[in-house]
Image (cartoon, rainbow, N blue to C red):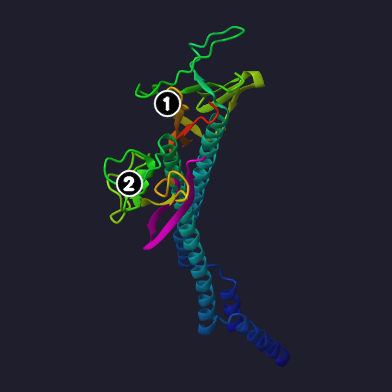
């Protein structure tokens, strides 16, 4: 009789209390584990966003600065730029103490050999173009980031000094319609090839 | 009959052995190993989170340091000067950096201009609610044997340090550069 009782005991399943305790522990542990994993993923995503914004912002400002500083000779207004075989290229950078050129979202330049190149705010990015070099609307950033508040300006201290070009913009990463990360970029530099 | 009883008692012994529960020592060892595992996992998670926060701040601090370097470069390019500071008014880059106190607190982003007074002793962590940005300058004079003489500054060394506090510890992202009139 004793043996039967023990065999019966061994074959018995979990009791309700045991199940409730186990499920309770799992219900307590799982949200904690998932919330930790969520926080880690969130932090990693923020780091990725920051790196992406900084990488593309740095690249954009360096590209503009290096190209314009090295090759830019005259800054012109495309709306006033005369066309023809021998166009008259008028440098529009005002002379000090005339107030600096009002900030605009484009920068049109000519190099020493009168090859035109430009940077224009377009489709939430900055497009680089140089038609005679077959470069049309080469975007300086990809779709992962958005560029806004683009302002180009220029001034010079006297008639014979090189133009000082200012470039300013914000680089942001938008996720679900909200700005996750944003960085401001601002630089001013002298043309070395004026 | 005798054999059957012997057989049944053998089965009973085996069953009893199988049904034996864990001893206290076994349970304690198991719980200790389990808790060691959980404590290690928790420590790793905390370290990962702290490291991630530090990396975030480092990226932002690097951006602030580069922002100031770029602004200083534009100041240098537009108005180098070359003279040493003697008395106000300050009209150029070299006069700014050769003041008696050569460290400056630039706690605005974008940089709004030169701070009103030199010296960074009261530079709080007010930049982006947790950073402070200090630039220390060292003027390098031209060779005194050459014209126009030893008071002309032809190079300026800059140490930019963006600092922040995290869990009572001071972190820093330094940036060192030299500005020269011949650039």
Which quadrant would residue A178 be assigned to in this image?
Answer: top left
In what element is the residue under mark 2? loop
Asked which quadrant contains residue A157, the reply is top left
Q: What span is in magenta?
A: B154-183
**Chain letter for mark 1:** A
Horizontal relation, residue A142 to residue B144: left or right: right
Q: Chain of mark 2?
A: B
Residue ranking furthest to the right: B3
Residue of label 2: B85
Q: Nearer the viewer, mark 2 or mark 1?
A: 2
Q: Nearer the viewer, residue B163 or B19?
A: B163
Which SS class for mark 1?
loop
- How far across and down, in percent of the image, does residue A57 sit? 51, 37
Q: CA distance from mark 2 to mark 1?
A: 25 Å
Task: Give coordinates of residue A121: x percent, y percent.
Answer: 50, 24
**Is residue A1 among what the camera can see?**
no
Query: What is the total number of numbered labels drawn onto the structure image?
Result: 2
Q: Residue at x 53, y 21 (%)?
A: A109
Q: Nearer the viewer, residue B64 or A157?
A: A157
A169 up-or-down from B41: above or below: above
């Amino acid at each position: 009789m004793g043996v039967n009782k023990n065999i019966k005991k061994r074959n018995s399943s979990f009791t309700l209390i045991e199940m409730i305790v186990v499920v309770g522990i799992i219900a307590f542990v799982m949200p904690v584990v998932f919330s930790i994993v969520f926080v880690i993923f969130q932090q990693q995503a923020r780091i990725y966003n920051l790196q992406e914004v900084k990488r593309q912002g740095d690249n954009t400002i360096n590209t503009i600065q290096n190209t314009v500083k090295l090759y830019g000779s005259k800054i012109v207004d495309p709306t006033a730029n005369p066309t023809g075989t021998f166009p008259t290229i008028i440098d529009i950078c005002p002379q000090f103490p005339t107030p600096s050129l009002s900030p605009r979202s484009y920068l049109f330049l000519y190099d020493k050999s009168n090859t035109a190149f430009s940077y224009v705010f377009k489709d939430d990015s900055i497009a680089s173009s140089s038609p005679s070099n077959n470069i049309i609307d080469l975007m300086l950033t990809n779709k992962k980031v958005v560029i806004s508040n683009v302002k180009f300006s220029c001034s010079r201290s006297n008639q014979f000094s090189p133009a000082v070009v200012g470039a300013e913009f914000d680089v942001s990463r938008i996720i679900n319609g909200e700005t996750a990360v944003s960085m401001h970029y601002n630089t001013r530099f002298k043309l070395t090839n004026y | 009959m005798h054999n059957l009883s012997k057989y049944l008692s053998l089965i009973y012994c085996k069953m009893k052995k199988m049904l034996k529960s864990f001893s206290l020592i076994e349970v304690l060892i198991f719980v200790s190993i389990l808790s060691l595992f959980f404590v290690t996992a928790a420590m790793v998670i905390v370290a990962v989170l702290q490291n991630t926060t530090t990396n975030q701040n480092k990226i932002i601090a690097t951006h602030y340091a580069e922002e100031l370097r770029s602004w200083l470069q534009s100041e240098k390019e537009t108005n180098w000067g070359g003279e040493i500071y003697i008395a106000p008014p300050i009209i150029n880059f070299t006069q700014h950096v050769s003041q008696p106190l050569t460290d400056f607190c630039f706690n605005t982003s974008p940089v709004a201009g030169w701070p009103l007074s030199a010296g960074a002793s009261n530079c709080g962590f007010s930049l982006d609610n947790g950073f402070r940005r200090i630039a220390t300058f060292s003027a390098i004079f031209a060779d005194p044997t050459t014209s126009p003489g030893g008071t002309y500054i032809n190079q300026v060394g800059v140490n930019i340090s963006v600092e922040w506090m995290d869990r009572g510890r001071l972190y820093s992202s330094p940036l060192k550069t030299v500005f020269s009139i011949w650039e």
